[in-house]
Image (cartoon, rainbow, N blue to C red):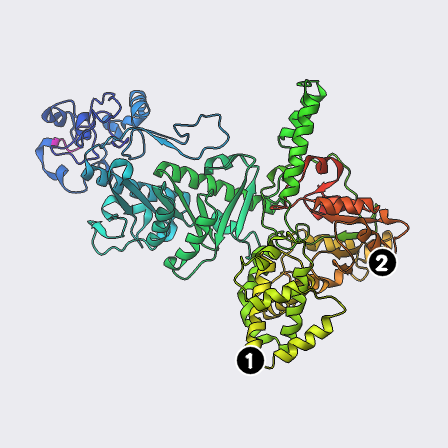
Amino acid sequence: QTSFLYFSQSPPPPNPPRRSMTPRQESLPAFTPDTYSSDEDDRFFHSSRDEQADLFHAPDGTSARDGAEATAPGSGWTNGAIPPLSYQYALHPYTRSGRLSLYSHHRRWINFQSSWSRIGQSSTELDAVHSESSSGQSVLTGCLLEEAKTVRALVAQLCECFYRHGWATGTGGGVSIRVGGPKENRPYRVFVAPSGVQKEDMVGDDVFELDMDRNVVAPPKTPDLRQSACTPLWYVVYRHVPTAMCVIHTHSMHAQMATLLDPTEKATTLKITHLEMLKGVGNHSYDSVLEIPIIDNRPTEDLLASQLERVILKYPKCNAVLVRRHGVYVWGDSWEQAKAQCESFDYLFESAVKMKSMGLDCGLVPVSGTYREEEERNDGEEKGVGREGDDETMQAEEKKEDVAATTAAPAFNGAASSDNQIDLRLATPTTIPLLPRDAKHLLLDIEGTTTSIAFVKDTLFPYVLTHLDDHVHNQMTNDEIIDTMVGLIKDVQSLNHDHPTKKELLNGTKDIPASLVQLLLNPIDDDNTTAILAYLRLQSETLSKMDQYKQNVLSLVQALMSHDVKGTTLKSLQGNMWKRGYHSGQLQGHVYSDFLPFLHWCRGPDPTTDAKTTQDAPAAPPVRISIYSSGSIAAQKLLFRHTPHGDLTSHFHSHFDTTTGNKKVSSSYEAIAEALGCGAKPEEVVFVSDAEEEVRAAREAGMVAVVAVRPGNGRLSERCKREFPVVRSLLQLCGAD
């Protein structure tokens, strides 16, 4: 498209350079496919060239017709050949008519389409989420050479823009634009920026044109250039995001700093919620939780390809990937969409970094100060709005939600992350107990309370399955293998007859030998265990039998873990394997960022370092923290002994596991209260868990029960949210908002 910097009265030279403009500029109609011409600049020359040349006289009195210097390469306004204003020549954009013409019809961006909007054709401006954009008509229909020339120039213009933003300094960053494809009944063509050039000085002649196999269709006119180092990664996006037509890579300082918000640099995602610009990144609204994947940097960009591919498939709703200590990749269904989303992401990254400096977590839902649907509903109910039939409707909805929450409730030791955003937005109407004012004993669950509920499933379980074969064949003695096999058989036999694990093993669904099926069918109890062990040890003297026992252990472990069975022997075996993993450094226990400051709060002032507190006022009595988890006590201690903050086990008074009793039964909590010395006053114990059945059982035993809501926890029923205090952070038990 035409440039917007031109003269209002100065005539062009006889053969004006392309960016030269004409006197007596008149408003032009907007470009359309019917009116577009590759020589559109000539439309501005409404007078004859001789007449225009006579209008302009240089300070020495010569006319533009008198010499050929004006036609020399590089001449024209772009190289400083601007008439002095003292000769009453004015730049056109600084006149009223010039500005009117410019902003009425002429867009500032070079483009090959007439318009663009972030709002797709099937959307409205009032939709909370916009997933695709819309474009106008092509102004280059049937003119592929002109399209290529335009896209090359556009890549250069974008690179210059990103340099001005500070995203592409030091020749870093780049842009790739894809055109064509099945929708246009022609092959894709991919235009990529070169490597190692000053992005603010790029021209279209520097840009490569490739096909989808990365073959060079048209090399840049500028010699000795190389394709951007980002090219392999742009193609990863194009292969796995079919709608992507542009990919942008920046070295934005905000993006780089956002990857360092987790001081351990172990975070795999950055979570952001309740910021208006979430609307600008696609697939998200103001109150969505945006999860941006983070991959680790490598010495060269091509080595990032496998990581990038993996997270694109894992997080299909996110149109960006952060690279730790490096920058960000952003894509969109048009170059305009990619640019708009890149700007929105950068705004969010800057917000996240600044919020962190203020002590705010960008991934947490605000406790107050933001709109909530349930508040609007409550306001309507108080005013008597919509009361007819409400009782039956609410009961039906609550029943449905209770059933859904119960059936979707994850097992405690191997839960996958769930979508619980509605719970994270909850403003609990119940009173949160304060420590140590309301209680001196705190009983904590682990998964979903102190630790991510997906930690076991995503980290610990995969470690067991990956290292199981080596552990059985190389780390266990023959006696240990036999004892473990018998214990695992007892774990299976203790299951209900309709349990899927039992069905699969006994009905032939699992490929296991008949000898193992026979062992499973013969009950093993305390009376015959010794005799069975002696018989199996006798049989193990043959090598083939011992190999079979090892295979039996592998089959039983895999079958039990596939359905998250928490058998006693299985947990013991897992604990032994995790112990090796923790000690070798292959495993590290996960705890939420609020856990360490919470532990310090519960311990109370340190008299050796806080003398002022102890002199001026008595120190707050410490809160005794105990752990109650379905994981074995040994596994609990391993997790807390090997955290990013070091060994935390000194902060705990006691540990309890299912040997004390089932976590869903009130008698278990009565036994724990007795062990803590609170048998007569169980209300002095606060129990925190993410599982509804557990908090109900604790309340039945007389404890104060609190529900923990963490990202990824199972959904809570409406009844639970009404009856129990809900905390998103353990620090709320200390009085924090």
**How many labels, in total?**
2
Mark 2 Cα-neighbour bin, 10 Å: few <14, some 14–19, many ≥20: few
Give the residue at mark 2.
675
Mark 1 Cα-neighbour bin, 10 Å: few <14, some 14–19, many ≥20: few
Place of residue 555 in the rendered image (x, y in percent of width and height, measured from the top left): 56, 64
Q: Secondary structure at mark 2?
A: helix
Alpha-carbon distance for marks 1 and 2? 48 Å
Residue, far bottom? 541
The residue depicted at 73 percent of the width and 45 percent of the height is 693
Q: Is residue 324 above or below residue 712?
A: below
Give the residue at mark 1.
543
Along the polypeptide, which appears first: circle 1 or circle 2?
A: 1
The residue depicted at 46 percent of the width and 51 percent of the height is 311
Q: Is residue 270 visible?
A: yes
Q: Amino acid at mark 2?
A: Ala
Q: Is residue 316 magenta?
A: no
Q: Main secondary structure of the magenta part?
A: loop
Q: Secondary structure at mark 1?
A: helix
Q: Amino acid at mark 1?
A: Leu
Query: 111 or 709: nearer the eye?
Result: 709
Place of residue 358 in the rendered image (x, y in percent of width and height, measured from the top left): 62, 44
- Residue 305: quarter of image: bottom left
Report the magenta residues as a range. 59-64
Place of residue 430 in the rendered image (x, y in percent of width and height, measured from the top left): 76, 36
Q: Quadrant of the C terminus?
A: top right
The answer to whether the residue labelled 1 contacts the one labelled 2, judged by CB atoms less than 8 Å apart, is: no
